[in-house]
Image (cartoon, helix red, strand yellow):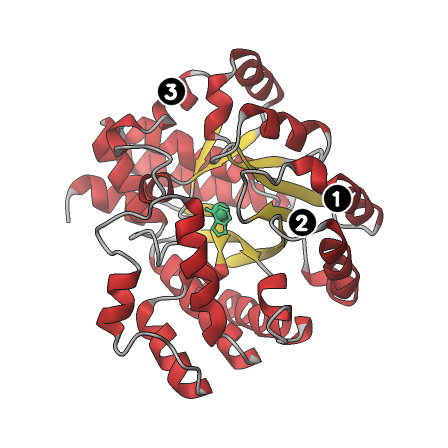
Amino acid sequence: MSSLQEFIKAMPKVELHLHIEGSLEPQMMFDLAQRNGVELSYGSVEEIEAAFRRGARFENLQDFLDLYYAGMSVLKTEADFHDLTLAYLERAAEQNVAHAEIFFDPQAHTDRDVPFETVIKGITRAMDAAEERWGITSQLIMCFLRHLDEEAAFATLRESLPYKDRILGIGLDSGEQGNPPSKFQRVFAEARKQGFRVAVAHAGEEGPPEYVREALDLLQVDRLDHGNRALEDDALVERLAASGMALTVCPLSNYKLCVVDDLRQHPLKIMLDQGLKATMNSDDPSYFDGYVSENYLAVSEALDLGREDILTLARNGIEASFVSPERKKSLQRQLEDYAAAAVA
Ligand code: ADE
Ligand code: ZN
């Protein structure tokens, strides 16, 4: 392991943009298909890996989403959601992730007749077990699928209410083009009224800067997921920087989904130089060839980032997290102790 690799792996960090369904590894997909008697169109783990295009890229976001939604058909029981979540949290804890904010897509399951309760009970049981076993804390963000309509999002919001105490906030994901944040303005307003404390949205991944403005103005997001295309609009960049709005950046995802042509052209360094609060995340680690440490390493090598830049990204992540003030202080202390020891 290179010294940069060791520095990144041992660094205490947080992850703020992670779709739990995107952490479904080929081996687990294969095993769950067998356990649940689900017919997959792949005959082996190797065939699933080939479908994930390990080492190669998807054509765009939709090309990936088609596989992502098909892949999660193996998730059926509470035990499946538990095992999926525990596997992610174990892997994250191994990489010294101290806190994770996890997205889940309930509509992708309830539309297959898997009850909301099954999904949330499995995920939260694993979150509790992981905290007990490895000390990793986590919170849940419920995403609405933006390719579906407003009424479907309202129905999901109603279904989620009995579990509100286990859901920190709401998000917006899936195919961005043609599905602007404005489509969900009333759903987000109602969710806030119902007591969901925070809101985030994918914006500017493939969609135009206007979608980023809508996420800010109409959904009143507390954090932006991706946000890459905000860079096309100088006034918007100034606004984001001045307001300290955090961006959950996902470099390997951007590469695998052709948001950038080459990691060496990734705008992460430009974001930092322009005063944007960029954070480092993996998005869908199983599909994009890397968990959060691999993201730090790949982009650090591609952009020649040093330890100070890496620490800035980790500090931004803690700052942008939705933890309590006490937990935030504790995470900050862990990171600063690590930084001090690393340069000593
Ligand atoms: N769902 C899972 N990964 C996603 C991504 N990168 N963009 C939008 N929706 C997603
Ligand atoms: Zn995402």
- The amino acid type, in three-letter code, at marker 2 is Ile
- The amino acid type, in three-letter code, at marker 3 is Ile
- Cα gap from disc 1 to disc 2, whole angstroms: 8 Å
N-terminal-most mark, 3 or 2: 2
- Asked whether the beta carbons under mark 1 and mark 2 sit within 8 Å of each other, the answer is yes
Q: Position of residue 261 (x, y in %)?
A: 28, 32
**Tally of numbered tags:** 3
Q: Quadrant of the C terminus?
A: top left
Check residue 188 in the rendering and tell me which mark sits there, or answer none. Answer: 1
- Asked whether the beta carbons under mark 3 and mark 2 sit within 8 Å of each other, the answer is no
> Which residue is situated farthest in the left direction here?
2
Q: Secondary structure at mark 2?
A: strand
Q: Residues within 10 Å of mark 3 (few under 14, many from 20)?
A: few
Q: Position of residue 86 (x, y in %)?
A: 46, 70
In percent of the image, x 27 and y 33: which residue is there?
A: 263
In this rendering, position of residue 324 left or right of residue 333: right
Q: Position of residue 284 (x, y in %)?
A: 41, 53
Q: Residues within 10 Å of mark 2 (few under 14, many from 20)?
A: many
In this rendering, position of residue 235 left or right of residue 266: right
> Which residue is situated farthest in the right direction here?
193
Quickly name the residue at label 3.
270
